Amino acid sequence: MRHAARPGSWRRCGHCFASRPCLERAARPQGGGGGGMLATGTESLLRQASVCLILVSREVGAEELGRFCARVSALLQAEDWGPDALDALRRLFLIVAATKYSRRLEPTCVALLQTTLCSPRCPERLQLLCAAVLREMAPSDSLSLSCDHAPSSRQLGLVASVLLAQGDPQQVRTVGQCVIKVLESRQPEGPSLTYLLPVVSKVTSLAPDALPEEQTKALSKRLGDWLRYASVQQGAAHASGGFFSTPRARQPGPVTEVDGTVATDFFTVLSTGQRFTEDQRLNVQAFSMLRAWLLQGGPARPGAADADDRSELEGSTVSVLSAASAASHLLPPAEWLREKALEYCQRLLEQSGRRALRKADSDLQKAVSAGGWPWAGPAAPSEPPVSPQCLVEAVLVLDVLCRQDPSFLYRALPCVRALRTRLCGDTACVRALLPIAQFFLHHGEAAAVDADAVCQHLFTRIPSEHFHSPMLAFEFVQFCRDHLVLFGSNLDLLRTSFPNLFKFLAWSSPALTSGFVALLPVLVDAGTAVEMLHLLLDLPSLTAALDLQLRLTPLHQLLQPLASCARVLQCAQAVPTLLRAFFAAVTQFASGALASQLALLLLERSDSLFQVEGYEADVHRVLSSQFPALCKLHPPLVVERAKELLEFVGSLGGPRSTGHMLTSVVWAIGEYLSVSWDRRCSAEQISRFFEALEALLFEVTQSRPSAALPKCPPQVITVLMTTLTKLASRSQDLIPRVSLLLSKMRTLAQSPAVGPVHGEDDLGAVRTRATELLNLLKMPSVAQFVLTPSVEVSQPRYHRDCNTALPLALDMVSRLLEREAGLLPG
């Protein structure tokens, strides 16, 4: 980034000062006047801008700042609110913001900033910048602002933000009273309230006792109403005023779910639509401040005995369904809000599991909730949200509710359990596993859930796979610090996990150093001290290793110069023997689940071996013989691992399509992808495999051999043809396709052009197999019997006894298909 060398020049940074988008985004209203979100793109721009501004702001002396304040004052006094005033206010904001020292502005300039902020005619952008400058000067003794000076709720929100920044407790109470009075007004056409809820949330966080009990109860009731009873109709479109505009075209439709269905339940932050109403925006903001408001409210008032009685009653689904609608309206405001909050969070968890039709709606499911939404404000940032904060916030609210009223636990537990099961394999929502673990740490004993097992998964997989996420790293370390008391006697789980935790530290050490300084006394003991000291001394090495991992630089590539070492060659020759001994032992006790895991490992490691001379080919021979053995041990694994097998087949081609591993995998697909082995096998699944193998056969037969692409052996081609024929016999809609393909293969094998490439013996094997399969497909029912025999037919006696069904069937088919014999008995 280049900076102009002239002192006193205002265009010091071409990115920040010369262009407007960076600061325009910073000056946008967030969440309707408070609590907004900044997406990744905006945060990146602001970080770049702040670096430049820290450098240039130090060059601005008091005299130069005074001259610039005079220029700003002249523009504001003349009510010249055009681009020059906007640009000048942006620069003034950056000057006062990009320094840790307090900047004092001319009193005239401060007064004009306040006047402009409260002017009913001033453009919104200028007022946002005026409020931002005044906040950066806090605390200031030259303010004369008052909430009474704000002519609109939007300006009231801005004035309140300036006053709250001063840190005066009495001012906080005054602001809270003023805002509550506006919120209590029930004028249907009154000012928008979306700008004021964030102010109330800030007031209660600064001074929990700032609001009287009656006002707190009233707002709790209204928050519950906004959460549960927001409109399910979209906002009305603005009339275009054109000649062809009609009232019918402007009728609002219902809001929808992310999967496209019409929302039949109440509105939430995950409901979608084109336009939104005022109460829907209040619904969003009510959820954004819900957890903080509940925490300010404290525990539920009923006694412990009363709570136990209610837990038994509310644990019954029938009682909840029968009593909820009639009794909920009779609840006190605080309990009413808790009831509606529980329903809201349960619905959110249900909505988050729906399959979104569009990417934008999928991003909405992972949107930031505590602090704003993509459409929460009139000019919210347009970038898609990037974190699963919606689920995080919902689970945190459920945790608060169950701590305040234990009777809620039996209603919240099923949906939290289901959510954890769903998210364990979803890398996009890994942050939501932290509040789920917190929930079970708080309530696991009462809910008869093993919280240690939940934390075990958290401490093993998450740091290893997501160490590069700075937000997750910070939250993970904070989670460990906040819940040391809850770990109690199970601190061993935390201590044994410290090598994984140190991956977070190695990758994000500046941000996490203080957190680990606090954690180290807990992590270290006599059993971990030596290893931890080694790890601390090798922390830079760990960072380098993680950097290599994140660049997908495999270890094999780094070690390649040593591949010709004599000792390495000797070890490589021993591996195939050891692998045979390993599989001979493991197949004696392997369960179906273990066989499935081992089969997946074979697929993953078949193309990830150290490139030692002859090593890959020797290992592939062993692995290719063991893959069918694992499938025989647990035949349903072909259906269970269908996704991985399809990915394996789809990634083949080129040099990888000539190996032993391909032949064994394709054979196993043809042998075990059948309803006779697994009832879950479907025609759709068979079609997907057929298409993948058909494409692979086309690729290996159409590619000409070269130095980089060796000749495809006939065994691969014949196994592919046989497997395709087997699949077609199980889904007979595919028989015409495979018949055409086999005919082409037979014709191709007879072509003189391919003779010099593959050799006559190879082509003869392909022709023979294609002819046999074509003859067999002429009688589909017989083909299915021969190519997909039942388990009984697979027994050895069916192949040894000439009087049993299989030899007789094959002999009969051969006779029927002989052109010379016709149908005459032989």
Image: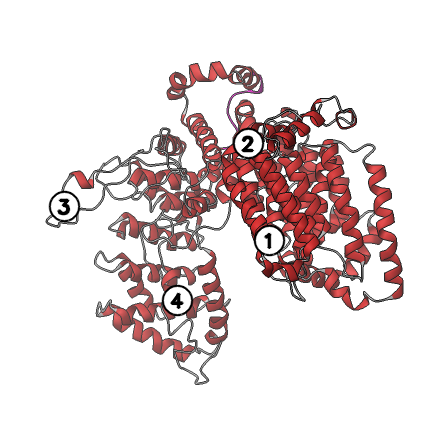
Label 1, label 4: how far apart the Cα atoms are: 81 Å
Label 1, label 3: how far apart the Cα atoms are: 70 Å
Q: Residue furthest bottom?
A: 6
The three-letter code of the residue at mark 1 reads: Gln
Spot occupied by residue 280 in the image (x, y as percentages of width and height): 33, 38
Identify the mark nearer the N-term, 2 or 1. Answer: 2
Spot occupied by residue 57 in the image (x, y as percentages of width and height): 46, 74
Bin the neighbour count of mark 1 within 10 Å (Cα to Cα): few under 14, some 14-19, many 20 and up: some
**Residue at point 23%, 41% (across, down):** 236
| Residue 730 visible here | yes
- The answer to which image quadrant residue 671 occupies is top right
Between circles 3 and 2, the one closer to the viewer is: 2
Label 3, label 2: how far apart the Cα atoms are: 51 Å
Bin the neighbour count of mark 3 within 10 Å (Cα to Cα): few under 14, some 14-19, many 20 and up: few
For the residues bearing labels 3 and 2, Cβ distance under 8 angstroms? no
Observer-nearest residue: 420 or 515? 420
Which residue corresponds to mark 4? Answer: 93
Which residue corresponds to mark 2? Answer: 682
Q: Is residue 779 magenta?
A: no
Which residue corresponds to mark 3? Answer: 245
Q: Is residue 317 left or right of residue 550?
A: left
Which residue corresponds to mark 1? Answer: 750
